[in-house]
Amino acid sequence: MQITFSLVLAATTLLNCRSLECSNTSSPVATDSLKKHGVVTASSIYRANYLAVGLFHALLIILPQAQQQALCPHIEHVRHDHLTLTYRTSTALALICLGSFVRIYAFWQLGSCFTFSLSKPDRLITTGLYSYIRHPAYVGLAIQAPAVLYFWAREDGVLACFMPGLTKLHVLAVVHWVLWAIALPVIGWVRIEEEEALLERTFGQQWKEYRQTTHYCPEPKSATFFAIYYYTLAAKSLNIPFQ
């Protein structure tokens, strides 16, 4: 069972990493404020961080107890269900995989039009996921990112291995969740507004007709759902009681 859990963890980690990288290169347009302010670079650091944490986690759980203690000096701070496959870990990993799959499929549909930098596309994609919602990759991120934080940025997760006291880790976890609570909607809104303005300039009437038949990302009702989803995972991660 532990070997299976380790393999699932490693696969989920690599899938998460793959959904956060872009092999296409392009010249960003002048209005690419995220590129200008270093957000793309920050996302690369975020990806590398959780790649390292995830692979460390996958290695830790298959080691004998003595070697676990050597690799994780404060293993007593790590919650038990982070070292075994339970419904909690299965649910978190499933959510990470779901969000990652949505993003990777959306990128695959875009093909050569997919870049992390804001750049002028050569065609308007209106099929598959894009026939329902204009920005499916951001929906995937909204599912994936809170689950990643819940699983790997919690105060009693594998990062507790290196913390003799939990107070600093608790503060770091709270700051992490608060920053993402602000960054996710702000970055998403800025990028979507810039993308849609560029698409309207590029495709004109074709874009306007497409926009009328599809949903934004997200609609007000789904935005409320994602806010509750984020708060729920944050509360469970930080051991905050529900009111």
Image (tube, rainbow, N blue to C red):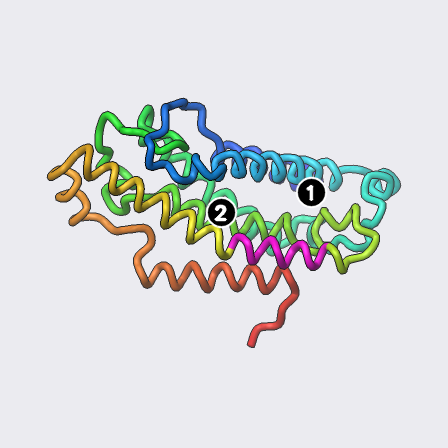
Q: Nearer the viewer, residue 138 or 191?
A: 191
Residue 173 magenta:
yes
* 138, above or below 7, in the image: below
Q: Amino acid at mark 2?
A: Gln
* 105, above or below 88, in the image: above
| Residue 194 location (% of width, % of height) | 31, 42
* Residue at the spot of label 1: 1
| Residue at screen point 33% across, 26% down | 111
Q: Quadrant of residue 224?
A: bottom left
**225 to the left or right of 180:** left
Q: Quadrant of residue 221?
A: bottom left
Magenta span dominant secondary structure:
helix
- Of the image marks 2 and 1, the number of the one nearer the N terminus: 1
| Residue at screen point 60% across, 63% down | 236
**135 to the left or right of 183:** left
| Residue 176 location (% of width, % of height) | 60, 53
Q: Give the magenta range.
A: 169-180
- Quadrant housing the C terminus: bottom right
Residue 80 magenta:
no
**235 to the left or right of 189:** right
| Residue at screen point 27% across, 40% down | 130
* Residue at the spot of label 2: 144
